[in-house]
Each structure stands twice: as C-alpha cells, then as structure tokens.
Image (cartoon, rainbow, N blue to C red):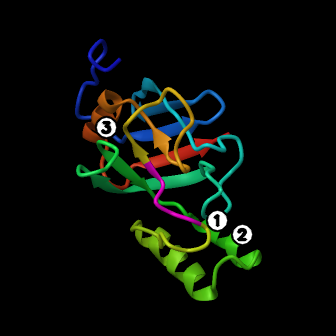
Amino acid sequence: MSQANPLKLPVINPRMIVRKASRSLELYSDSGLLKTYKVGLGLNPVDDKKEEGDRCTPEGEFYIFTKNNKSAYYLSLGLSYPNAEDADRGLRDGLITKAEYGAIHAAIRKKTMPPQNTKLGGQIYIHGHGAGSDWTRGCVALENEDVRELYDAVSVGTPVSIVP
C-alpha cells in the first residue's frame, strides 16, 4: 500500500481518526485527508474499552504519548488511554481510586503517559504485525509498512480520535 502512494513528508499538523466499523485509520493534515489505512482491532472490536482484559479497543479522544522503535509489534505509537472520560467513569464505577483518578487527569493535562496499570487497563498502541483481522488485546494494528509510514509522519502529541 505505502509503496504505491508514499506520503509526502513532513505532514503539517497531523491528526488521525480510527473508524472501528470500517476498520480504517485516516491520516489528516492541515490540507485534509492524506491517506486511509486498513486496521485490525481488539478481539472484542465493537464495544468501547471499559476495563483491563476486556479486549476492546477504546473510543474517544487521545494523543500519541510515545513512539517506540523497539516494539514487539514492529513499531508502535502509544495512545493516551485511559483518558479523562475513562477516569470519570472508572471513579464513578469504583474501578479506580481517587489517587488513580487524579494521576490520570494530571497526565492528560500535561499530555504525558496516563497510568497504564489500573483496573481500566492500559498499554493501548497503534502498532504493526497485521491488519487482516481483529486479533489484538485492544490495540489498533496495521501492516508493518503502513505503521512505518505513520511512525515517520507523526510526532508525540498528535491527536487521535477513535470512533465507533
């Protein structure tokens, strides 16, 4: 896919939208839609992520908090899950403590990594190793050449929306 239509770098003000229903990731810039990629999702691909182990891909507004070039899944871009709305729900439902709630909100305000080891779950990434099926524990998976292209095009802080 990438070789036929390579991205022109740099991408100005990149942002991404993952559309779960169509199993696609759209990369946008100031000038509009640049490219659409096929993705695989979690083993429970329809529901929104609620807690650790549910194998759902989360929905909402996130940002890239890290780029990992030593990923077990080729390359990966860390998503800021859980977000503020997840923290609000988690506190209300008794899944997280007030301290965890505060730590999540503080990380979101600072655009850093939110706590990854609460009952809400964590370690949600955009990564490689194949988009042919829904096979992850909640991550967004692409073909290796496609995640390489995204990895090179975006930076830490890039916004990512995940919608049903």
- Ranked by sequence position, the earlier of labels 3 and 1 is 3
Is 126 rendered above or below residue 106?
A: above
Look at label 2 and name its amino acid: Arg
- Magenta-colored segment: predominant secondary structure: loop
Residue placed under numbered mark 3 in the picture: 12
Is 98 rendered above or below residue 2?
A: below
Q: Nearer the viewer, residue 41 or 27?
A: 41
Residue at 51% x, 63% y is 122
Q: Residue furthest bottom?
A: 99
| Residue 59 placement, left or right of 116 | right
Residue placed under numbered mark 2 in the picture: 89
Q: Say whether marks 1 and 2 touch (CB < 8 Å).
A: yes
Q: Say whether marks 3 and 1 touch (CB < 8 Å).
A: no
Q: Position of residue 48 (x, y in %)?
A: 68, 51
Is 139 rendered above or below residue 89?
A: above
Whole-number angstrom distance, CA of label 1 to CA of label 2: 5 Å
Q: Secondary structure at mark 2?
A: helix
Look at label 1 and name its amino acid: Asp
Q: Nearer the viewer, residue 73 or 95?
A: 73
Give the position of the N terminus as an image quadrant.
Answer: top left
| Residue 134 placement, left or right of 88 | left
Q: Nearer the viewer, residue 109 or 131?
A: 131
- Dividing the picture into quarters, in which one does residue 164 lie? top right
Tag of residue 86: 1
Residue at 23% x, 49% y is 69
Q: Position of residue 127 (x, y in %)?
A: 39, 43
The magenta segment:
121-125
Q: Residue furthest top?
A: 4
Look at label 3 and name its amino acid: Ile
Q: Secondary structure at mark 3?
A: loop
